[in-house]
Image: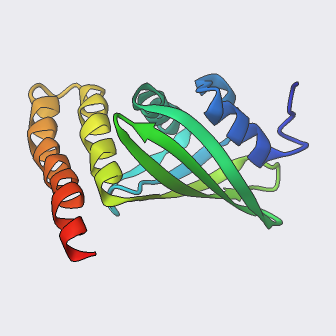
Amino acid sequence: MTVHIQDSPARAYREAGEAHDVQAIKATFADGVVFHSPLSYRARFDGRRQVGELFEAVFDVLSDLRYQSDIGDGNVRMLTATAQVGRQELNEVAQLVLDDDGLIRELTMWIRPLPALTALMAALGPRIARGKGTPGLPLLVSAASKPLAAMTNFGDRTLVPLLT
């Protein structure tokens, strides 16, 4: 079944995401789309090309992406989803702000739990760094993010049960 963006932009985005179809997801973006990262307030991606490259990296590390909810009205939609990053299950909320043509002009994501967020950071960071063309940057990003992912995973598995 083909979903036309004009009929349901959020549905077209969801179906493209579940299919890991980068070209289809890019077609849901306005030229000046802005993506606000769940990893850092400072991490922002601008334009269809940058956001599309980000989603290429995301689709390389996420599996079993499934959307459960699509709520909102007018030009704002909130989507909930689950996915896997390695052995970690993650929950995602995405806010899509649509322009007058029904294309996504702003996309903000939130991800939980913390071990899944840090696992995503450890998996995505080096991939994104490779695209910057700075020698050594992927190694530096990996060295900084992998210990954080290991610590949050250890804390979640070992310490949280002692506290609950």
Quadrant where the image shows the C terminus = bottom left
Q: Residue at x 76, y 38 (%)?
A: 12
The image shows residue 43 at horizontal and vertical percentages of 34, 53
Residue 139: image quadrant is top left
Q: Residue at x 43, y 46 (%)?
A: 89
Q: In this image, 139 relative to 86: left or right?
A: left
Q: Is residue 49 above or below residue 72?
A: above
Q: Is residue 141 above or below residue 104?
A: above
Q: In this image, 61 relative to 153: left or right?
A: right
The image shows residue 72 at horizontal and vertical percentages of 77, 66
Which residue is most to the bottom? 163
Residue 9: image quadrant is top right
Q: Is residue 10 above or below residue 123?
A: below
Which residue is most to the right? 7
Quadrant where the image shows the N terminus = top right
Whether residue 75 appears in this view of the structure is yes
In this orientation, which residue lies closer to the viewer: 153 or 104? 153
The image shows residue 73 at horizontal and vertical percentages of 82, 67
Q: Residue at x 48, y 46 (%)?
A: 46
